Image (cartoon, grey):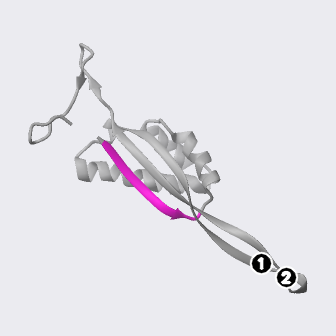
């Protein structure tokens, strides 16, 4: 079962946010949250907020524990670009861009194994496998 959380129109360029996302990709949640809290980048606080949102989605919507989750993927896409102008001498103007990003985190449940090596799957209320 995949748990998703998405943040749109983050006021940071996608290139800067991807640097932070690549460091915590495929990490256990405890290690990822520790790395994001100690990282000295603007994107770290934005991704930490998004990761906490995904964890709370898993807890409230699917009754999963935080220990049973891991990061499946983090994607950072380009958002809209604000075009701005800076007035300069002789009646001219220089253009510059303010970029935005869309970030998406997908968490997955860790499959536990028995002593024989078989995966344990949880059963849903109606009897169907998850």
Q: Is residue 33 above or below residue 46?
A: above
Q: Which residues are magenta?
A: 2-11
**How far from the left and from the top, in percent, is residue 112?**
28, 26
Which of the 4 image quarters holds residue 10? bottom right
Q: From the image, tell me which residue sits under label 1.
A: 86
Q: Is residue 35 left or right of 112 when viewed as pictured?
A: right
The C terminus: image quadrant? top left
Q: Is residue 10 above or below residue 2?
A: below
Residue in view at x 55 percent, y 46 percent: 21
Secondary structure beneath label 1? strand
Queried whether the magenta region covers residue 80, the answer comes back as no
Q: Name the chief secondary structure element in magenta.
A: strand
Closest to the observer, 13 or 116? 13
Q: Nearer the viewer, mark 2 or mark 1?
A: 2
Q: From the image, tell me which residue sits under label 2.
A: 92
Q: Report, in whole angstroms, how far the alpha carbon at label 2 lies from the one at label 1.
A: 9 Å
Residue in view at x 27 percent, y 49 percent: 59
């Amino acid at each position: 079962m995949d748990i998703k959380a998405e943040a749109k129109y983050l006021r940071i360029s996608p290139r800067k946010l991807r640097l932070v996302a690549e460091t915590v990709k495929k990490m256990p949640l405890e290690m990822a949250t520790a790395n994001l809290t100690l990282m000295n980048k603007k994107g770290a606080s934005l991704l930490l907020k998004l990761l906490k949102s995904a964890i709370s989605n898993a807890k409230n919507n699917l009754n999963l524990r935080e220990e049973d989750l891991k990061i499946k993927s983090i994607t950072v896409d380009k958002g809209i670009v604000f075009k701005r102008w800076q007035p300069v001498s002789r009646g001219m103007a220089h253009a510059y861009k303010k970029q935005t990003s869309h970030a998406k985190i997908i968490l997955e449940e860790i499959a536990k194994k028995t002593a024989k090596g078989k995966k344990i799957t949880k059963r849903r209320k109606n009897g169907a496998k998850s």
